[in-house]
Image: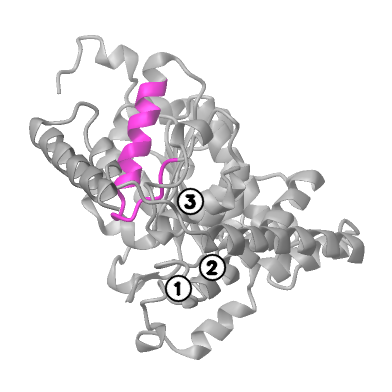
Amino acid sequence: MTISADHTAQHPPAEDAASEAVRKFGITAEDYMLPARHQIQMVGPDGTLNLHTEQGAQAGHEYSLPGDDELMTAYEQLVVGRRVNDQNSALVRQGRMAVYPSSHGQEACQVAAALCLSDGDWMFPTYRDSVAVMARGVDPVQTMTLFRGDWHGGYDPTKHKVGIQCTPLTTQLLHGVGVAHAAKLRGEDTVVLAMCGDGATSEGDFHEALNFAAVFHLPVVFFVQNNQYAISVPLAHQSVAPSLAHKAVGYGMAGERVDGNDVVALLAVLGRAVKLAREGSGPLLVEAHTYRMQAHTNADDATRYRQDSEVAAWVAKDPLSRMKSYLTERGLLDDGGTARIAEKAEAVAAQLREGLGEDVPVEPLDLFKYVFSTPTPQLTEQSALLADELAREEAAK
């Protein structure tokens, strides 16, 4: 790659970007880039709002409570997401989906990721982020098309500004950085949220994405959902860093840790990260501590690498029950609201059952249409051979 002579002017060094952010908060560069000493948690597992002194905040790492409307929207998406996770697990057992990586227990991360973005921003999800894709406005059946094995990703990425869910580990981070770089060169007001899991942080693509984003000072928020396992490999066997958020300082960007089962804290932390990226502070890394309650996919036997007691300990931290208790205590949620939201979730589940139960017409020639924008001679020849064979079969009927 050729770097222009005015590279420094177009892309200020990371230390200059950090210095600007430091000036905003009146703290040292180290205190800006290093995560707060304690993870950010606003609402505890029992649904009670923590005292301000117990929320993990410190100078330069202070957060305001999200508005009531945003909290209610988030809770509704949490309920829908949980119902979708459970419905999809049933559809896999019925043979109507080939595979499904459930995010049961991680829905707070999913919902907050979608709600913190503006309409013009981009999200790049992993294969486990279906609830986030739906919360971004993608049709539920289109979202799940990938897991049925039909078509491509099921939805138009450019329409929704949501990348196709990536099965190859960590490639979506590079895609997100590329979109952010293009948006910056065009002068667009775009922030990219690039999602990954703890296992992805062990991949080379993770390093390349973060390093490029930092050097070119791009508006990217890297969101790591640390659900404790990379399939069957626990975090302790992947990294001995104090936290995954601490990896940010090595790239010259700010990092933060947040309770991934506390949707209130997630909205606050991710919302501020997006705001800072939009204002020109460069990329940021947010690590959310959460837990994958169910198996990696329906093909995984989680009992081979973790104990039931471990799972039970995380059930007590469930993001859905926590948020319901918090909103009820504040008088924002009553029985009528609970019933209305549950009814909406059931409607989405019914939509999935109906949509994924339909037979999809198969067009054999589509095998060749979408490989290259300009088909190669070999593909053109093969397509013609198949078309001729199909025509002869039809004539023989």
Q: CA distance from mark 3 to mark 1?
A: 44 Å
Residue 180 sits inside the magenta stretch: yes
Residue under label 1, please give it: 95
Q: Tag 1, which secondary structure?
A: loop
Q: Nearer the viewer, mark 2 or mark 3?
A: 2
Residue 205 sits inside the magenta stretch: no
Read off the magenta span. Answer: 163-183
Q: Residue at x 72, y 71 (%)?
A: 321
In the picture as drawn, the residue positioned furthest to the front comes out as 396
Q: Residue at x 18, y 41 (%)?
A: 388
Q: Residue 35, which numbered label?
A: 3
Q: Residue 176, which numbered label?
A: none
Q: Amino acid at mark 2?
A: Asn
Q: Horizontally, is 229 left or right of 389 in the view? A: right
Q: Amino acid at mark 3?
A: Pro
Which badge, 1 or 2, is on the more N-terminal residue? Answer: 2
Which badge, 2 or 3, is on the more N-terminal residue? Answer: 3
* Mark 3 crowdedness (10 Å alpha carbons): few <14, some 14-19, many ≥20: many
Residue under label 2, please give it: 88
Q: Position of residue 129 (x, y in %)?
A: 48, 55
